[in-house]
Amino acid sequence: MSVQSTIPKRWVRFKEVIITTLVGWIPNLFLGAVLRKGLYRLIVAHVGRSVYIQNGVELLGTNHILLDDQVYLFQGVRLNAQGDNNRLQLRQGVALERGVDIGAMDHTSIEIGDRTYVGSYTCIMGTGDIKIGQDCLIAPHSGIFANHHRFDDPTRPIREQGLTRKGILIEDDCWLGHKVTVLDGVTIGRGSVIGAGAVVTKDIPPYSVAIGVPAKVVSGRIGKAKSLHQVS
């Protein structure tokens, strides 16, 4: 890589470090929130209206991060979009609770849809694209991981065997319970509910209720809704 091509990246990283160091620690009062929103516009690719960033939020690869209107980032949130051709976008009204960790590797897109809530200490990471739809609820300590390590060759360390990347899609209006794990290559259909502690290894049809390890569909929400309507 030539020196000329590394200078812009170094300059971007230098500005990022200076600005986040200066204002990232300021206590979560009116002044801190205003300074962060204003100065982060100089380094973040897009900052919408009424964005709220508490102190202690860590932002890396800010030139690949887009924060739409009314995004809320609470203490301990970490957004890492460092790398080539990445895109990490939080749509309007997204709220990330304390300790949420989102990381994109090279050539990765991560998008969280309007009004989706992500609970404390949830981890969303991968080399494959991740898209989470609108109005989703993701409970604390969940994990969404869009890649697998290869381990076919027992004579080589697993870390040297590379990764597979298929991506994850969680459609609109889904609810993931406490400590749900979603693995690479999975689509969770619209309106589905995943029970606490489940490990989702295969696609879940729309409006399903799934539980267990691995997660299995135990009922459908549409049938329940019809039954309740008939009873009423």
Image (cartoon, rainbow, N blue to C red):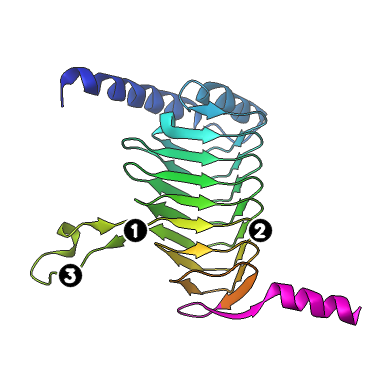
Could you tell me which quadrant the N terminus lies in? top left
Residue at 30 percent of width and 25 percent of height = 9
Q: Secondary structure at mark 2?
A: loop
Gap between marks 3 and 2, in whole Å? 37 Å
What label sits on residue 147 in the rendered view? 1
- In the rendered structure, the answer to whether residue 1 lies left or right of residue 19 reads left
Q: For the residue carrying disc 1, how many other residues have a C-alpha within 10 Å: few (<14), some (14-19), or many (20+)?
A: many
Gap between marks 2 and 1, in whole Å? 24 Å
Residue at 30 percent of width and 20 percent of height = 8
Which is more N-terminal, label 1 or label 2? 1
How far across and how far down the image is residue 87, in percent? 43, 38
Identity of the residue furthest to the left in this view: 155
Residue at 53 percent of width and 28 percent of height = 46
Residue at 12 percent of width and 72 percent of height = 154
Which is more N-terminal, label 1 or label 3? 1
Going by the numbered disc 2, the residue's amino acid type is Asp
How far across and how far down the image is residue 111, in percent? 51, 45
Q: Nearer the viewer, residue 27 or 144?
A: 144
Q: Secondary structure at mark 1?
A: loop
The residues colored magenta run 211-232
